[in-house]
Image (cartoon, rainbow, N blue to C red):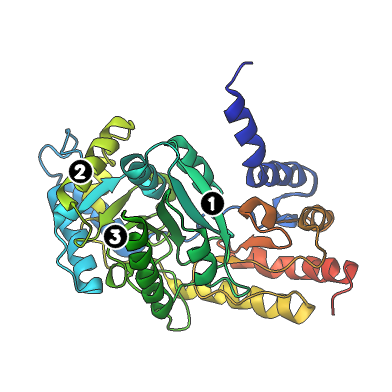
Amino acid sequence: MPIAKKIEENLKRASWIRAMFEEGEKLRKIHGADKVYDFTLGNPDVEPPAALKEELKRLALDPVPGMHRYMSNAGYPDTRRAVAEVLAEESGLEFSETNIVMTVGAGGALNVVLKTILDPGDEVIILSPFFVEYIFYIDNHGGAFKEVSTKEDFQLDLAAIEAAIGPRTKALIVNTPNNPTGAIYDAASLEQLGSLLKKKETEFGKDIYVISDEPYAKISYDGVKVPSIFKYIDNSVVVTSHSKDLALPGERIGYLAVSPRVKNLPLVMDGMVFANRTLGFVNAPALMQRLVTHLQRESVDIAEYQEKRDILYNNLTEMGFEMVKPAGAFYLFPKSPVSDDISFVKAAQKYNILLVPGSGFGKPGYFRIAYCMDKSVILNSLPAFRELAKEFGLS
């Protein structure tokens, strides 16, 4: 075999978004880019906020001496202090730079956390629908994943979570606002989850971590605020990036933050820093750390995303598509008009509409629309969606 069997198997499982992107390339060559409506990738089309451009200019014209040299593996202290200051305000807890590790995006942060806490065979609960990379990240570090479905409205199913927790459970990954649904878990649910985990920790005599994946935390709509998980769950870790809130996906800059209430905190943080180094990430990019230090309260224009959400949600529901209205992120997750979501997504290609089947997120019978593109593409796609709706007998 030219590559490992496990990798070959994983390639098949992880192929949906890649396969749809490649299909889009074929269609663009045939019909032209303006006639293809590609809703597959969560790649922000908006530009970073003006404050970021000004800070980048300032750093270029008046660089900090030694700013491109090696640093502490946890990252620059002033950057970590800036992150900690905001987290302290949001949570009411005493965060300091010692609770923060700057990372190579949220993906890097997730791998660092899992590397630090997992022993071989430990179980991590993931909530479907989920970001498919969770499966591979858990496997990277010898863990096993256990899927638990959310409710019909994509909120936490606490009874199902309780039933899934066992003696090998080490962590639960939550993603709020969620990819692919846009759901935000409310404070009451998180408080109940915290109480449930305390009960289970006592029952099994072990710590259970909640890892909250939050790259969309600043992208919420209709006045909804994303609750701080640190308020409700003691053994909690937030992993995030500035890919979405500052529109910097290509820069791979993020961080992990460990609650001050985590048991054996100094040892946990030492483990995180060690894992950051030995996984090969070593440091988050130096220039990007300097850049985001003073931008922790900035974000892209959320109103643009809300307008796009509303255009698609209002028009698609009028056409007969059923979906939960997302409270955040930049995705819609409608039900497929037929149980076979893969066949539906393939049918959409006849109208040059590119979607991702829910099967790619552990939730067959749905499909994902990423609306982080130019508004004109969304508007131009609506006649094609109407034809697609007619084909499947929607009203």
Residue 13 appears at what percent x and percent y?
65, 41
Looking at the rendered image, the quarter that the C terminus falls into is: bottom right
Q: Amino acid at mark 2?
A: Ala
Which residue is pictured at 73% across the width and 54% down the height?
36
Circle 3 crowding by C-alpha within 10 Å: few under 14, some 14–19, many from 20: many
User: Would residue 178 be seen by someone viewing this image from the given angle?
Assistant: no
- Say whether disc 2 or disc 3 marks the residue closer to the N-terminus: 2
- Say whether disc 3 or disc 1 marks the residue closer to the N-terminus: 1
Q: Amino acid at mark 1?
A: Lys
Looking at the rendered image, the quarter that the N terminus falls into is: top right
Q: Residue farthest to the top?
A: 1
Residue 9 appears at what percent x and percent y?
64, 32
Residue 135 appears at what percent x and percent y?
53, 45
Quick one: SS at disc 2? loop
Which residue is pictured at 16% across the width and 63% down the height?
95
How many angstroms separate mark 2 from mark 3 (CA)? 20 Å
- Say whether disc 2 or disc 1 marks the residue closer to the N-terminus: 2
Compare residues 153 and 37 and report the one nearer the observer. 153
Which residue is pictured at 38% across the width and 42% down the height?
111
Question: For the residues carrying marks 2 and 3, which lies nearer the camera in this image?
Answer: 3
Q: Which mark is residue 146?
A: 1
